[in-house]
Every structure is written in structure tokens, then in C-alpha cells.
Image (cartoon, grey):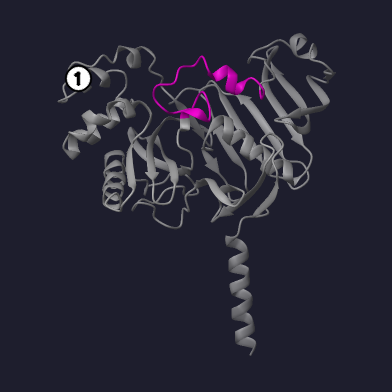
Amino acid sequence: MKKIWIASLALILALSVALPAFALGMTFTHPEIGEPMTVSFVNGMPQFKIYGFTYYQIVDPQTPYRGLTANRTPLIGEEMPGLEESVNQVLDSAEAASGREGLSFSAAGVAADYAEQLDRLPRGEKVRAILLLNGFSGPEGYTELQSIPGFEGEDFSGLADTYLIYTARVGERRYEYRVLPFSFEDAENHEYYVEWYAYLKVDGQWRLARIAREFADQFESRQLYVHGVAGFGLEPLYDVHYEAMRELEWGAPMDSVIGLEGAEADGNGVRISETALFRIPCSVSFAFAGGGLEGITYSLRNEQSYYSAFISLYMRYADPVTVSPEGDMTWSLNDTYIELIYDKNQPLVRLTRDTAGVP
């Protein structure tokens, strides 16, 4: 009996270590969307439902998806799938499933405009064209693309001229970062969804880091700018980013920040005691270095505000780059590092100016 009790205790302790250190979810009415939503976590990765229907999920890191394992913690490791390997695996899986009545799929984003050319290509050239279209070989790749049958007469100057090197921060380092979208239509089940495959350039090689699913028919309708996706310009980013930045820019002088309604000096910083972020009540403090704005921290009021902030940040910045076992999440723009920090009583949303380049 004693041995059984000890074995049971050991199992309980093992499970308690494996579980996240934060609450596993909540149902509430989102302050911006105004609809009842449920946020939950599956093996540490978030998902949310609206009226019981899954709208967004980062796929389970414990279960291979389309034969690929991603979303690990820590995010970067030796087992990350390679670029061409992973795209071929996605196409193999999707093509096998498309034999079922009513299911179709295609490369989304900039590649969607070239669906006919892509469908006529053999597999190797098709993968190559998808990757070139999505900027994985840099702006020079658009010239290379014109050597592929069906693309000879196409004008890619617009994509080349607006080409961006996207970066994302993981821990204390920045990596080149690109996101490859695929669109799916399941007419039998009346479902439309986009799958996002996010890659980091690790030691000179593109590696798959994140797989997420979004149940919507057109991802472009959700937001004006998706970090890492080819074909977006920087101009719409202001509309996405202005609320969290309070219409300020990095490097703004303290006097400009004090000019905000209700702002007051607080030592070497500035603070507003009563305000809102994404319609979530909070306070906000501003940090300065060298006379210019370097950080913005929102202190939220309760656990529900953590889940609300996650959905609002997702709405603006798409997939989080990292998710920790403690429930902390990060998003990265080329010049801004965004953290959502879980705390049952006072969650934080912290924006930090980050201009460090890729080493």
C-alpha cells in the first residue's frame, strides 16, 4: 500500500510539473469584439473559440501536424524542420487530403495571384516558385523566378521594390523571420481556414518554428499588416500599431509624452494612472533613454484582462513569436518587441524599442 501511495504521489508531482503555471483558460465577453469567447491552452499553446467554434489555434506541439512538429518550447532547437522539407510535407499532406470531396487548398498571399502557373509546375519547381514569391531568397529571387516556366513575362518589380527583411526576437537574439500562408476550403464542412508556417533563419538556414491555424476565408480582411508575410508595405503598419504606441513614435521627447491627457512626470518617466488599452482598463508608464521614448508598459487589472489582451494583440500582430510555459507571450516587429506577461492580479503589456539587427 505504501509503495502504491508513493507511486501515486510521484505521478501527481510529475503532472504538476508538466502543467503550465497559469490558469488554463477562461470564457468572457471580449471588450473590443463584444462577443463571448473562450480562451484555452493545449499543451501550453493558446487557442480561442467564438460561440463554441474554434477561430484560432497554435497547433499542439506534442502531436505532429501534417507530419511536422513545431511550436516547441524553447522555440529554437536542433529538431526544427527545414524549409523545403516542410513545404513538401505540407503539399504532400494537403494533396492527399484534397482527394476527399469538397476540400481544396492553395498557396495564399502573393502566391495566390499565380495559382494557375503554380498548378502547372512539377513539384520541385512549384516549391521553388512558392518560396521565391514569398521572399525566402531576397529581392534577387524575383529575377530568378522569371526563369521558371510560366513566370517568364511577369513583372515582379513591385514586389522587389517593396521587399522587406523581416526580423523577430527570440530571447536576446534577433533572427530573420518570414511567414508562409496556405489557404484551405472545406466545402463539405463549410470551413475556410488559413495555415501559417513561420520560419526563423537559424545559422544561415530557414527553419520551421511555428504552425498556426486561423478559421477565416481571407486573412487580408483581418488586418492591414502581417509581419513576416511578403507583399505588405510599411504604410499600413501605423494603423495597426498606433493604439499600443498611443500615436507616439520611438524617440519622442518626454515633453511630448507629458502633453498626453492626464500624463504626469514620475521620476525619470511619465505615468497615466487611469487609461485603457484595447478598451481594457489599465495604467501606463513611459520609459526614456537619452531623452527619448524607449519603452511603454501597460499594467492591467485582472486575469480576464490577460486573455482579452492576448486576443487584441493577436488581432493586430498575428501569431505570437514565443509562448512560455508560464503563459508569457511575445510579438516582434522590426523595431518593437512586445511582451504579454501573465500575472493573475496584474498582467502587463510591455513595448520596448528594439533596433538591434540580426547578428
User: In this view of the protein, which residue sits in the foreground, 2 or 241?
Assistant: 241
88 inside magenta stretch: no
Q: Where 202 sits versus 80, above or below?
A: above
Left or right for 249, reference 167:
right
Quadrant where the C terminus is found in the figure: top left
Q: Which residues are magenta?
A: 220-244
Badge 1 local density, few (<14 within 10 Å), some, or many (20+)? some
Residue in the image at 67% along x and 15% along y: 248
Name the spot of residue 345 as percent of width and height, x first: 78, 45
Quadrant where the N terminus is found in the figure: bottom right
Name the spot of residue 154 as percent of width and height, x first: 23, 16
Q: Dot 1 corresponds to which residue?
A: 146
User: In this view of the protein, which residue sits in the foreground, 257 or 303?
Assistant: 303
Residue in the image at 69% along x and 51% along y: 27
226 inside magenta stretch: yes
Residue 182 appears in which quarter of the rendering? top left
The mark total stands at 1
Residue 10 appears in which quarter of the rendering? bottom right
Q: Where 230 sits versus 160, above or below?
A: below
